[in-house]
Image (tube, coloured by chain):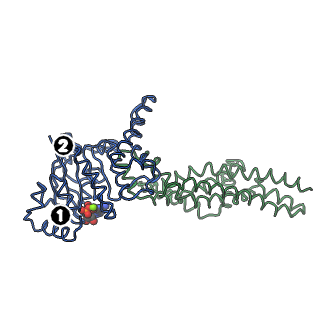
Chain colours: A green, B blue
Amino acid sequence: MSFIEVTLRLLTGFKQTLLIFALTLLFSLPLGLVIAFGSMSKFAPLRILVKVIVWIVRGVPLMLQIFVVYYVPGFILGQPLASRFNSVILAFSINYACYLSEIYRGGIESISLSQYEAGQVLGMTKTQIFFKIILLQVIKRILAPISNEVITLVKDTALARVIMVVEILKVAENFATKALIWPLFYTGVFYLLFVGVLTLLFGYCERKLGYFRA
Amino acid sequence: MAVLEVNNLSKRFGTSEVLKEVSFTLSQGEILAVIGSSGSGKTTLLRCLNFLESIESGSIKVHDRVLFDSNDQVKYDENDIRQRRLHFGLIFQSFNLFPQYTALENVTLAPILALKKNSDSSTYRSKLSEDIRAEGIALLERMGLETKQDSYPHQLSGGQQQRVAIARALALKPDILCFDEPTSALDPELTGEVLKVIRSLADGNTTMIIVTHEMQFAKEIADNIMFLDEGMVVEYGNADEILSNSKNERIMKFLDRYESTGDY
Ligand SMILES: Nc1ncnc2c1ncn2[C@@H]1O[C@H](COP(=O)(O)OP(=O)(O)O)[C@@H](O)[C@H]1O
Ligand SMILES: [Mg+2]
């Protein structure tokens, strides 16, 4: 098989990798914020429930969670709840939302109470205070830890292959079973290039938010 | 007619009584200086007036309208409290500007948000927000900050930041402006510019409550003085009389300390 052919096959796998990556972020970024609010709720039962969920999700290997989401409904209902691909997205989104929620929470709690009070005495509503004053300061503070999570996600997508979702590493493994080893190492180039792009993107965002100090 | 009437206001944190039956009135354009040693409850008093703290008992009236009365047993929702807050403006010791907004945006943010919430016609709204912007610029000019309207807080000195904070509070046209030690977070050479601005407001008939350690300034600007000690009003009355011939031992001690350290 020629280099070009292998590259094209790996690219189709990489398309799947990117899709898992993008959908996971799409769902987990907002879901993480909801979970963060839950873990800061004044209503103790909700807060405790959310904290237990976060503990479980962060305490169990992501691979196991993928198995659970795909196979456990099958045992109980007799058929899987979701397709292989959707199971991966569901497991990834919940897992990443829990990690992100802790980053959000840390960021939100690091903003001084006096910023809220300054908004309050100006007659702003709670929603206005959060979205117009607090949020951007939080984003600026959590950009670096978020970029860590995002880069980890790029590589975690490779776990999708444990339930036969064919992303780039699975494609390369299929070559390997036919005694073609080098594509396996060649995948590293794809990951590195993509992470490079993301690093530049986060650097750009950081510079964009550099106009103020918080 | 009294602009503000505070009656028997009491406040507890847990078991410690921080304010004990504080009463006073303010008439239009009156300036009240609140003095007292650290921990005497000055900040808490201003925070209660601005509804940042819950109040155990007492009442607050503005222009004869009851804003709070512990006898009424009514529970105010967030919206009520928000409306009531607008009668007061509060200038914090540490400015608390919004770091991601320019000086002008800090001043216009709240009025523009209020506008968006209250008016529905969008053409009318864009005209009004132009007005708010023009007013914001005028306010910053009054604060001597005409060249700084596009600066971000971290690009301003403490004195400039505090003047932006004063403009921000004025933009909502409160009935009573409250200052919590407005110059005590500033380097000595920067206090003058802030005091000058407050003086100019005094000439403009603004009703103000000023918590301050600047005795000279209090003497010069205040109509009345309230001396708080452990949450109690120990002395309250005409500024000149209290500062020049008070017979109260605690206030004498307090004045001695501040005048002898030259802390004004
Ligand atoms: N949030 C709070 N919780 C408990 N105690 C408080 C709180 N805020 C202030 N206090 C106490 O109330 C008293 C008055 O504080 P404060 O009003 O800040 O005094 P001042 O401004 O005159 O220095 C102090 O003893 C202080 O420790
Ligand atoms: Mg204080």
Whether residue B13 is visible to the viewer of this picture, yes or no, is no
What secondary structure is marked by label 1?
strand
| Label drawn at residue A103 | none
Image x and y of residue A47, in percent: 46, 56
Q: Is mark 1 within 8 Å of ligand 1?
A: no
Q: Disc 1 sits on a residue from what chain?
A: B
Amino acid type at circle 2 is Gln
Image x and y of residue A9, in percent: 84, 52
Say which residue appears at 10% left-offset and 68% top-offset: B249
**Callout in the foreground (2, 1):** 2
Image x and y of residue A29, in percent: 58, 51
Q: Which residue is mark 2?
A: B28
Residue found at the very far right of the displayed protein: A1
Q: Which residue is mark 1?
A: B229
What secondary structure is marked by label 2?
loop
Q: Quadrant of residue A198?
A: bottom right
| Ligand 2 found in image quarter | bottom left
How many C-alpha atoms fall within 10 Å of the one at disc 2: few (<14), some, or many (≥20)? Answer: some
- Frontmost residue, B206 versus B27: B206
- Frontmost residue, B132 versus B54: B132
Say which residue appears at 16% left-offset and 50% top-offset: B7
Sequence order check, earlier mark of 2 and 1: 2
